[in-house]
Image: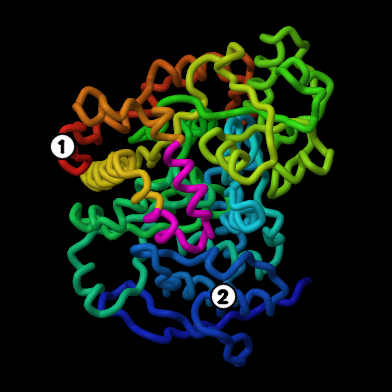
Amino acid sequence: MPERRTFELTERSHCRNAGTAGLLDFSLRGKPLAVGLSGVQSALNSAGAVLPRDDAYSSTRGGRPVGLYLRASAIVRNVRKTRDVRKASKTSYAGNASKTNGVRNVRTISDARNASQTNNASQKSPVGSYVGKNSIGTHSPSAHALSAHSPAAVAAVLIATLVGSMALAACAPAEQSAHSEHLRSTTFMLSWAPDTNHIGIYVAQEKGWFTQAGLDVSVIAVAQAGAEQAVNSGLADFTLSPLANVAAFSAKGAALKQVLQVQQKPSSIWCALASNTRISRPRDFDGTTFATFGSSESDALVRRMIQADGGTGQFDKVSVGTDTFRTLSSGKADFAGFYATWEGVQAELRGPQLTCFRGEDYAVPGNPDAIGITTSQALIAKNPQLVRDFVQAVQRGYEYAYAHPDEAADILVRQASQANLDPELVKTSMKAIVDGHYWGDPQAITEGAFTLGSADFTGTQEYFDFLYAAHVYVDQSGHQLREAPSSRALATEEFLAHTQDGADEKK
């Protein structure tokens, strides 16, 4: 039987509010360890565990790390007291996102950050997997994940989970704590490394619009089982997710709803290296190898493109690592999925040169990329005013970013400094988003004719119907659904502010 490790944690500093936490001192069998996040790292590493970078489990307030939560330490302390901890760690989520077909699954923020450091691109898959930003398909949990059968793994999972819990408030300076007494705490969980899709969150944070709305928002790293699972379980309040993800999770019993749709048109591109002269059109994908994360959704989309171009839709697949460009350059795969507004921009700026095709040009219907703010139906029922206040503050942030893209890009780089974003990439990405009207017609938004955040019920339903016909949607038992998911049941516009309410901010 493996040796049981004991984690003793003591509070180093106290906050003014009961229930909040200071930085923590860690000791392992009486030996003092480092303070704060590095203490978590050291304690678990000493137990034979491997965690990602220290800040992977930090929370932020105003873009600054504010430490861990005291209640997380209490749970870790209980590792030595109970055998039920392992059971708790296995049941804290509704299911395992890595086992779902057609779901844009997530990887840990550390994986996405590692990719960011190698190619200045986070890893988010267009269709079939939102994992950061670099290739289409579903990705399994991080290669850095701990063994689920070790006490150290249990401790790590509980720390990661509880740091993301909406019930916990982070420690702040005394004057900030006093002010925070009048704010409602809420959490936004990243689904992949920060990029321009998240920009409205960071703009609202820096401009103080969350505080004006009476909110104290913590931006936290993705949990191991995925952001959608964390939100569905109540461990986080909000995340950024494509409506196609909401549909796939809902098919398996989750109760999620998209409350603000940021992206109004597809941005997925399916590309080979330009140096691969064998591929000049989608039907040339026949008989080649697709760099994928394993999603049946992306398989269906690629197959439709190939067949619409006169091919058979037969291709091999290989799993992607943290860098899809490298997977292609190594010759392990011939094509992959990217996003025109991120990897497409990166390729134009830094290379490699790509030969790309868009699904909408080859009979893929609707909008696969309806990315937006997602929450749980339980939170909507319990606290609709909090949902409304958060959504409208975020909506204001996206509106401002759309009207002031360069300033917003600077804010994102500054606020999400841990992601090591390339300022030129971020600014060029925002230019592509604005020029391409990806969030809607800017003039129509300014004039009040279109509300940023509106749900594209028609486009998303067309895409759901296509995936249903391709037998992508399955329930918890793996059985095909009897009907396609309903976009009107999975998204709502009820919490949006009218565009004109924020028009002055955009002028």
Label 2: which residue?
A: 40
| Among the 4 quarters of the image, the one containing residue 207 | bottom left
Residue 97 is left or right of residue 486, and the answer is: right
Up-down relation of residue 288 to residue 505 (above or below): above
Amino acid beneath label 1? Asp
Name the residue at 66% across, 70% down. 152
Query: How many discs mark residues in the rendered view?
Result: 2
Residue 333 is left or right of residue 162, and the answer is: right
Near mark 1 (Cα within 10 A), the count class, few <14, some 14-19 or many ≥20, is few
> Residue 296: x percent and y percent?
67, 27
Of the 4 image quadrants, the one containing the N terminus is bottom right
> Residue 406: x percent and y percent?
37, 48
Front one among 172 and 363: 363
Up-down relation of residue 92 to residue 298 (above or below): below
Up-down relation of residue 362 to residue 60 (above or below): above
Residue 229 is left or right of residue 120, and the answer is: left
- How far is the residue under mark 2 from the one under mark 1? 45 Å
Name the residue at 22% across, 31% down. 446
Residue 24 shows in the view: yes
> Residue 2: x percent and y percent?
76, 72
**Labels 2 and 1: the sequence-earlier one:** 2
Label 1: which residue?
A: 501
Residue 350 is left or right of residue 249, and the answer is: right
Residue 382 shows in the view: no
Front one among 120 and 157: 120
Q: Say if the magenta span includes residue 219.
A: no
Name the residue at 50% across, 50% down. 424
Q: Which residues are magenta?
A: 410-431
> Residue 127: x percent and y percent?
59, 30
Magenta segment, prevailing SS (helix, strand or loop)? helix
